[in-house]
Image: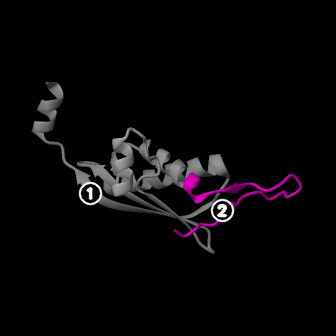
Amino acid sequence: MDEQPLLNVSSDNNLGQVEIAPEVIEVIAGIAATEVDGLYAMRGNFATGVVERFGKKAHSKGVKVELTENGVLIDLFVILNYGTSIPQTAQKLQTNIRQTLKNMTALEIDEINVHVVGIQMETKESDEQKED
């Protein structure tokens, strides 16, 4: 298991250092993404599926954070609702995540890449099951 370095965010070393783990950035970005209209779900992997079956919410599901020499790179893997504008929803995701991370961590994010991996289709069968 490769260890990702901590991100040093403090500029004043007189009081000590403030470091943020990439997992914290993933969780903040995942929560900020769920606030955007048009998003159906975030794509996870097998491990997040198992964790959610046991009742624990995986907030970092569908978010990958990479620390590079140029800065912080975020990849989102999302499933959108049918009928929503993909470019507008992707722009809202990028804006909301960038603003939330700026407010909470004072980090400037270099890139937020949105990968649309699916579209959720509404069917009459699922609507009828909800009414029953």
Residue at the right extreme?
14
Left or right of residue 68, residue 13 in this image = right
Residue 47 sits in which quadrant?
bottom left
Does residue 44 appear in the picture of this structure?
A: no
What residue do we see at 52% from left, 54% from top? Answer: 26
Q: Earlier in the sequence, mark 1 or mark 2?
A: 2
Can you tell which mark lies on residue 6? 2
> Is residue 75 or residue 87 the one in the foreground?
75
Crowdedness of circle 2 by 10 Å Cα count: few (<14), some, many (20+)?
few
Left or right of residue 75, residue 127 in this image = left
Residue 40 belongs to the span the image colors magenta: no
Does residue 58 appear in the picture of this structure?
A: yes
| Type of amino acid at the residue the image marks with label 2 | Leu
Span of residues in magenta = 1-25
Residue 21 belongs to the span the image colors magenta: yes
Residue at the bottom extreme?
69
What residue do we see at 54% from left, 70% from top? Answer: 2
Tag 1 residue: 118
What residue do we see at 33% from left, 43% from top? Answer: 53
| Type of amino acid at the residue the image marks with label 1 | Gly
Residue 115 sits in which quadrant?
bottom left
- Note whether 130 is above or below 62 in the view shown: above
Q: Position of residue 51 (x, y in %)?
A: 39, 47
Which quadrant does the C terminus fall into?
top left
Q: Position of residue 80 (x, y in %)?
A: 30, 51
Crowdedness of circle 1 by 10 Å Cα count: few (<14), some, many (20+)?
some
Determine whether the residue tagged by mark 1 lies in a helix, strand or loop.
strand
- Note whether 33 is above or below 73 in the view shown: above
